[in-house]
Image (spheres, helix red, strand yellow):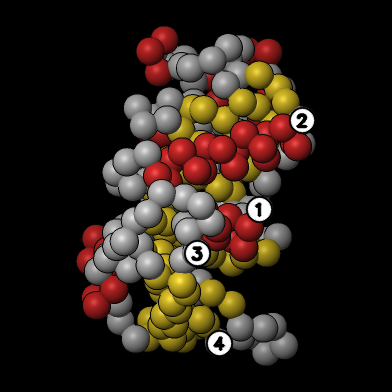
Amino acid sequence: MWLLVAVFMSLAARSGVAAERVAPPPHQVKGSWDFASLPAEVRDRMHRTAGEVPAFPNEEPKLLDLKNWPKYRVFEGRKCQLEVHRADVLPRGRPPRPEYTTQIWASYECKPWLWRKAESLGPSYYWTSDGQLLERAYSRTGRRGTAVRIYQIDRAGRFVGYLDRIHGTEEYFDADGSLIAGEYGRVSLWMGERVSHVEYAARRRRLFRDVRWRY
């Protein structure tokens, strides 16, 4: 699932009043976060716990099973057709996981308006070959392009990542829901410490390896 980050860096915005939020309990804050000292534009986009993240749009529990996906659906007045893809998973030195040999993803490809190109709208889900959900996204047409919300899940089924392509935001959470790290435009934060984008990317790679294989 984490390999899809490079392809799908994502998501839709959420208008917020983060500066007015009540601070989370101390046990939900890890690191040296000093929220009051952060720029307002960062606070307004930040989710201090996983519980603050917007719910998945248009939740449809039946879609957890690929067999329940209709062949055709209409999104934003456009007829869309189901597309299912499969790709082999390369170990790259990670611990063996026999049941995870293939990654499967489903999405809807929608017919274009006039001169515009076709695009994916609505839900996109990604599974292991044995049916475990890895990641899901939801796409809408936005004023600045396609707005996509991406929700990433670890092997234990816990929500760990939230990405917003339109606003250049991504966040990662620990198993207890506390914020680990986030990147908000050009501001990169890790456990409350401001770091360079290069350092942030290096720590994110290590986090991905840990989250993917420790459960």
Q: Find the distance from the CA under tag 2 to the CA under tag 1.
A: 21 Å
> In the rendering, which numbered label is found on residue 203?
none
Image coords of residue 114 (percent x, y): 67, 89
110 relative to 143, above or below: below
For numbered disc 3, what is the local secondary structure?
loop
Which residue, given by chain and number where applicable, does mark 2 sit on? 196
Image coords of residue 93 (percent x, y): 51, 52
In the rendered structure, the answer to whether residue 206 lies left or right of residue 50 reads: right
> In the rendering, which numbered label is found on residue 90?
3
In the rendered structure, the answer to whether residue 172 lies left or right of residue 114 reads: left
Q: Find the distance from the CA under tag 1 to the CA under tag 3.
A: 30 Å
Quarter in which the C terminus is drawn: top left
Which residue, given by chain and number where applicable, does mark 1 sit on? 166
Q: CB under 8 Å between callouts 3 and 4?
A: no
Residue positioned 68% across, 46% down in the render:
168
In the rendered structure, the answer to whether residue 101 lies left or right of residue 3 reads: left
Image coords of residue 213 (percent x, y): 40, 44
Residue type at mark 2 is: Ser
Mark earlier in primary sequence (3, 4):
3
Residue type at mark 3 is: Leu
Mark earlier in primary sequence (1, 3):
3
Q: Exactly how many numbered labels are in the figure?
A: 4
**Figure quadrant of residue 82:** bottom left
Residue positioned 57% across, 30% down in the render:
181
> Which numbered mark, 3 or 4, is in the foreground of this view?
3
